Image (tube, helix red, strand yellow):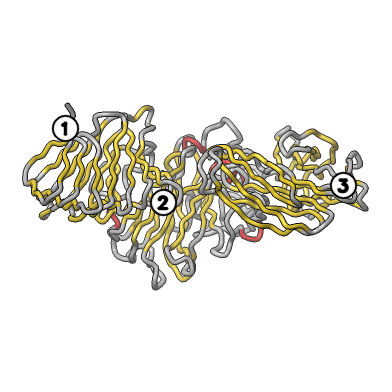
Amino acid sequence: MKNFYSFFFSIVFPFLLYAQDLTIEGTVTVQADGLLYVEGNVEIKPTGTLDIKSSGSQRGKVKVKPNALTGTWVCNGTTTGTGEVQFLGANIDYTVSGSNVAFPHLILDFGQVVGGEIDNAMTLNANTEITQSLTLKKGKIITAAGKEIYVSNTAGNAILGQNSGSSYTNFGTEKSRYIEGTLRRAITTGADNYYLFPIGSANRGYNAASVDLRTSVANAVIPSGVTSLIAKFKEIDNPGNIAVQYTTSGDCYFTTAQQYLEFYWMVKKYGYWDIKPNDTTKATGWMYDFYCFPDIDYLTNPSGDNPGLTHLKIIKAPSTAPLPSSSMNWSPYFFQSGNPCNGVNVDGNTFEWFPGEFQAAAATDSIAAWDLTTFSRFGLAGGTGAGLPIELLYLQAYPVNNKYIQVEWATATEINNMGFEILRSTDGVNFTQIGWRDGAGNSSSTLTYGFPDHQVVPNQLYYYRLKQIDFDGTPDLTYIVSAMIVKQNVFTIGEFIPNPSSDNSRITVITDKEKDLNVTVYNTLGQIITNADHHVVAGTNTLDFNFSLLADGTYYAIIKADNEMYSRKLILTK
């Protein structure tokens, strides 16, 4: 028969207690030389306290290993002391919840690693504080939407890897132990204050970052009032219009004076690091160095849309830049950050520093940006050893005299550009070619193009995009725009674009009159996710939606206008 322990009174364990399914309603104290071993689930009631003592290097220990494939830790009471809690076992998933979840030293050593990766995870359904240290030996942490894990110890080595003596070694190639979601770390400047953020995402895996606040190395400065940094690695399917950028002569950016960058591919197909101070008004006034540890196996994988990157550099958005979205134009916010010579070569499955003013070529597991003075989002830009075909300045579609739709675009530069296929769709998903425009081949001047689409009918919303093709046949798709010619009494609601989406989506509303709309988004259980009123004017209107905090699944938008209801379906895949 399974043992069940429930403590309603104060009890002290100086040596060893073995228990299953432990419930604490009084006070349980584990002395510095004590061990509490639980082979089951743990619940700390609102009246309960778990006090884990330590003395010098000797810590009291609580070890948890379920006798099933799942385990739970629920804390609505109090956890005190400076001892440690270890989660153990093979092929086990844990769930942590409660109103007051905290651990002193937390050690994760669970799950089964196959091929360097692990499927098992600890899911945090509550904000969780680590007051002393977090050691990731084996096992992944997933924070639920809107939740975070907070390491409140300001020591640089408060997050440890397999070797307990270092806060930032043995993580560079790790795929089985990281935090998928939001990690917050308490920070301060000091001689040893180098802060690792071992973060990643479901599809990209481990993509850590670190912030160097060492006064002896980075001459670090933190604005007054900032006590922590909040970090996550995010994926985004449609980041909006990111024009291809190039460097100017003399900045020694890579190996040539002018190098075109695959920034769009890096953000859309890879992701970006979102790191911000706890006081978001203090984005400026910093001095620090930034390092990222991207997954080189993914970056060098020749399958998919990888253009065959040969070198990389960190790009940082200004602190004033808005969040990425499908309707965003990145061009005004794009700039190079850090020491301009500080990039890396991609050679097979290794990174190597570029030789620069202060460094020789050397193998590395990270990419750096030094002497930064603001905080925001970080991405990677890369080159392929050859220029990208075009730099698209804009793409637009609009009705002309309510008779046809004009599609127009402009390029700032073109390299080996054979031309453009003009693609059209009525659902925003399935596109067919309706025209062609020859490219200029090679150009460094602004060129404009146009295509009149006369094969349109009134009150039908049309979507347009371009497929640019270079002389060797390589294609590249642009973002999507839409337009409609209308008759009187028109009211058209488009589909979600993009769909499926991982983050943001939008709906186009075209009307010949001003209207008030109500949009309610439901999940498949009929629960209301969002509800908002919108006012649309005569013409084309865009309703933008941010679904970054929602889980994967199917959602439905019910749009009410003039006592009529319209339904639109969205699929989220992250």
Q: Hey, what amino acid is under mark 2?
A: Lys
**Residue 50 position within the rendered picture, expressed as x and y whole percent measured from the top left:** 18, 51
Select label 2 or label 1 by which is in front. 1
Q: Are marks 3 and 2 in contact (CB under 8 Å)?
A: no
Q: List the residue tagged with mark 2.
A: 147
Which residue appears at 36% of the width and 52% of the height? 127
Side (left or right) of 501 relative to 376: right
User: Do we see residue 12 in this rendering?
Assistant: yes
Query: Few, some or many C-alpha atoms within 10 Å of disc 1 (few <14, some 14-19, many ≥20)?
Result: few
Q: Name the image quarter holding residue 193.
A: bottom left
Which residue appears at 70% of the width and 49% of the height? 560
Q: Hey, what amino acid is under mark 3?
A: Ile
Q: Are marks 2 and 1 in contact (CB under 8 Å)?
A: no
Residue extending furthest toward the left:
14
Q: Report the quarter where the N terminus lies.
A: top left
Q: List the residue tagged with mark 1.
A: 3
**Residue 533 position within the rendered picture, expressed as x and y whole percent measured from the top left:** 66, 57
Side (left or right) of 214 relative to 243: left
Which residue appears at 13% of the width and 53% of the height? 54
**Residue 230 position within the rendered picture, expressed as x and y whole percent measured from the top left:** 42, 57
Q: Nearer the viewer, residue 57 or 214?
A: 57
